[in-house]
């Protein structure tokens, strides 16, 4: 599903304003997440720990707002292949940030696995670009878009670290739903300002 997302978003954002499309898809996603969060809540034992609202605000800002803005700005300025390649670096950034900021240690095998995954993704995408004449393109005209997507990947990785303690108190679906409820109105405001 993630793999299908990038070419669909790229194609759609060539037809309509990226932020209008983003606001529409986030509105639908919020409704779907609400249903999944409700199902999850019926099967999950409630936590008795206090909910860390400050950490939640940081998580939501990183993954629900900043990441989305960087992603939409970036995908409209580079190729779908470049986006897929750069976003595939998220696990690598998560591992690096975990090492430096929360002291998690990965075994050498984990680092080798991350490197193989990254190189493999690069090889697959590059082969597709050579066969079809599209995909990864390292032209300088895509530099701004590529940097925005790279920063988006780093932002998502940072949000992943922040979510670790949140998931001790709330289920993943509920966390995603709460974040969407908190940030989707911000994306609607962007659209209102863009159109207005």
Image (cartoon, rainbow, N blue to C red):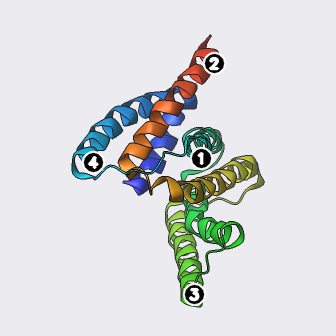
Name the residue carrying label 1. Answer: 55
Comes first in the chain, label 3 or label 1: 1
Cα–Cα gap, marks 1 and 2: 30 Å
Cα–Cα gap, marks 2 and 4: 36 Å
Using the image as rendered, state which of residue 82 and residue 162 is in the foreground.
Answer: 162
The disc label shown at residue 40, or none = 4
Mark 2 or 4: in front is 4
Cα–Cα gap, marks 1 and 4: 22 Å
Residues at circles 3 and 1 in contact by the CB criterion of under 8 Å: no
Residues at circles 1 and 4 in contact by the CB criterion of under 8 Å: no
**In what element is the residue under mark 1?**
helix
Name the residue carrying label 3. Answer: 107
Mark 4 or 3: in front is 4
Comes first in the chain, label 1 or label 2: 1
Mark 1 or 4: in front is 1
Residue positioned most to the right: 140
Packing grade of label 3 (10 A; few <14, some 14-19, many >=20) is few
Residue at (57%, 58%) from the top-left corner? 87
Name the residue carrying label 2. Answer: 194
């Amino acid at each position: 599903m993630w793999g299908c997302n990038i070419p669909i978003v790229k194609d759609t954002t060539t037809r309509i304003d990226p932020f209008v499309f983003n606001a529409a898809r986030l509105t639908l996603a919020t409704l779907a997440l609400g249903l999944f969060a409700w199902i999850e809540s019926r099967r999950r034992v409630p936590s008795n720990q206090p909910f860390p609202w400050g950490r939640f605000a940081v998580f939501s800002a990183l993954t629900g707002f900043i990441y989305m803005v960087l992603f939409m700005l970036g995908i409209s300025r580079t190729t779908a292949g470049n986006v897929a390649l750069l976003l595939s670096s998220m696990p690598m950034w998560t591992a690096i940030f975990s090492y430096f900021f929360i002291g998690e240690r990965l075994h050498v095998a984990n680092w080798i696995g991350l490197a193989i995954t990254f190189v493999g993704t690069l090889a697959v995408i590059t082969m597709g670009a050579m066969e079809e004449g599209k995909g990864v393109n390292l032209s300088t005209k895509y530099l701004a878009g590529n940097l925005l997507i790279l920063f988006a990947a780093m932002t998502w990785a940072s949000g992943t670290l922040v979510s670790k303690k949140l998931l001790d108190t709330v289920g993943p679906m509920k966390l995603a739903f709460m974040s969407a409820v908190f940030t989707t109105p911000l994306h609607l405001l962007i659209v209102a300002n863009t159109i207005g």
